[in-house]
Image: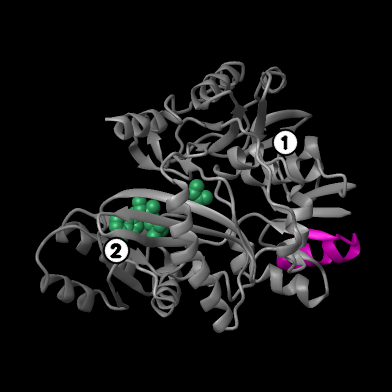
Amino acid sequence: MKVLVVGQGGREHALLWKLKQSPLVDAVYCAPGNAGTAADGINVDISDTDIRGLVKFALNEKIDLTVVGPEAPLCAGLVDELEKLGLKVFGPSKAASQLEASKLFTKRILRRANVPTARFERFDRAEAAIASLRTLEDGPCVVKADGLCAGKGAIVCANHEEAIDAIKRILVDREFGKAGSELIIEECLVGQEVSILAIVDGHTIIPLETSQDHKRALDGDLGPNTGGMGAYCPTPLITDELMTEIVEHVLIPVVHTMNMEEMPFRGILYAGLMLTETGLQVLEFNVRFGDPEAQPVLMRLKSDLAEILLAAAERRLDQIEPLEWDERPSVCVVMASDGYPGSYEKGRPITGIENADELEGVKVFHAGTKLINGVPCSNGGRVLGVTALGDNIFDAKRRAYEAVRKIRWEGAWCRKDISDKVRELLETENA
Ligand code: AMP
Ligand code: GLY
């Protein structure tokens, strides 16, 4: 089987690496890929948003399965275009991708599915939004642009002054362009945040092992938001009982409602949830694997990923064996360019990746890298996802950082506390 992975980040390298291990797979391509996918597969120089180019490639090369990593091509309808031509693809349709592409769409689905979510109001004019805010007691709220904003569209505000500023940024300054032509003002929820990812084929729902990412740039969850500076798998936050509750009260009703709406959901359903004092509430959905969560999760998957994703694409997930997981927990530490999440230099040569990869239980996934004259060089903010399995989470962390220390480039940095949350959680549990 010939497989095409669409995207160029750490998530896509992890997908490609895992797909390649399948006895069903003869060749894996990545469009456009990075230096890591070039080493483990074959890069194709087509952008992940060039829908026509990707479709043409899949058709000409007789690709048997396309796996779409990022949200942009999903929301642009890549899956629909491939399916129209009878090609197999893992990922949601453009209509179903609205669960990530539109906050208002998601609120409507959640309401119809009777799934708890924060109270909200929608606005397309700043004056109306501000006037409505003034009728409420001053306090925290969340202002969210409706559309896709690369993870930056939700602004958590401590008070009305901050909220008014957020409203103006979205509706007056048009900071997010068309994605911010409408916004919602939402009740601010308090609690622990967790996420659950499940593989869905429109009917069958298979939850994956749990993971938690680290969104802030600095240790102790300080500093600006990033795409994610590391992740670990599994998280003790999600017990078996909680998982059952999430499947029964969130995933099943949402998948069912999407069918009722004639937009069956197929692909990865990623639910962002808040565990509040009064129960769980949905914050958001993504329609793809998380990055960097995919790296530690796929590192632990023992089952054949190609077989699973093909079964999902063919709508027969109910026929596959239960997923098998490595008992060992995993930790992924993101190494970034200096300046990230602000501006940074590219093109810096990286050394030591092979030495790190040689360590027992370690795999270095590339994210923002590119081969220049055969040498892997930095080519993005998040450059590598150094991932390790260990006997326990602390051992996995130790191994991941041992691998990190073997890798060098000018200006490389990382958080030093990835997975320390587990210790805190276990201590609170035992207290
Ligand atoms: P979203 O894009 O909706 O997931 O929001 C991004 C982040 O903002 C979430 O991961 C939460 O940390 C935070 N957030 C979103 N909605 C709320 C809410 N209603 N209350 C508190 N925090 C929120
Ligand atoms: N790590 C969060 C995301 O992929 O959206």
The spot of residue 325 in percent (x, y) is 65, 40
Extreme-bottom residue of the structure = 261
Q: Quadrant of residue 246?
A: bottom left
**Which residue carries the number 1 mark?**
36
Give the residue drawn at x 58%, y 57%. Answer: 198
Spatial CA span between label 2 and label 1? 38 Å
Q: Amino acid at mark 2?
A: Val
* Residue 149 visible in the snapshot: no
Q: Which mark is residue 424?
A: none
**Which residue carries the number 2 mark?**
143
Residue 357 in magenta stretch: no
* Residue 73 visible in the snapshot: yes
Q: Estimate how packed mark 1 is, as few (under 14), some (14 to 19) or many (20 or more) residues with alpha carbons within 10 Å.
A: many
Q: Amino acid at mark 1?
A: Gly
Asked whether mark 2 lies closer than 8 Å to ligand 1, one says no
The spot of residue 313 in percent (x, y) is 74, 65
The residue stretch that appears in magenta: 51-66
The spot of residue 37 in percent (x, y) is 75, 40
Q: Main secondary structure of the magenta part?
A: helix
Asked whether mark 1 lies closer than 8 Å to ligand 2, one says no
Residue 62 in magenta stretch: yes
Task: Look at the numbered disc 2 and give the secondary structure of its residue.
Answer: strand
Q: Is residue 84 above or below residue 273?
A: below
Give the residue drawn at x 70%, y 74%. Answer: 80
Between residue 362 and residue 340, name the one nearer to us: 362
Which quadrant of the figure contains the N terminus?
Answer: bottom right
Q: Is residue 145 above or below residue 67?
A: below
Task: Look at the numbered disc 1 and give the secondary structure of its residue.
Answer: helix
Q: Quadrant of residue 221?
A: top left
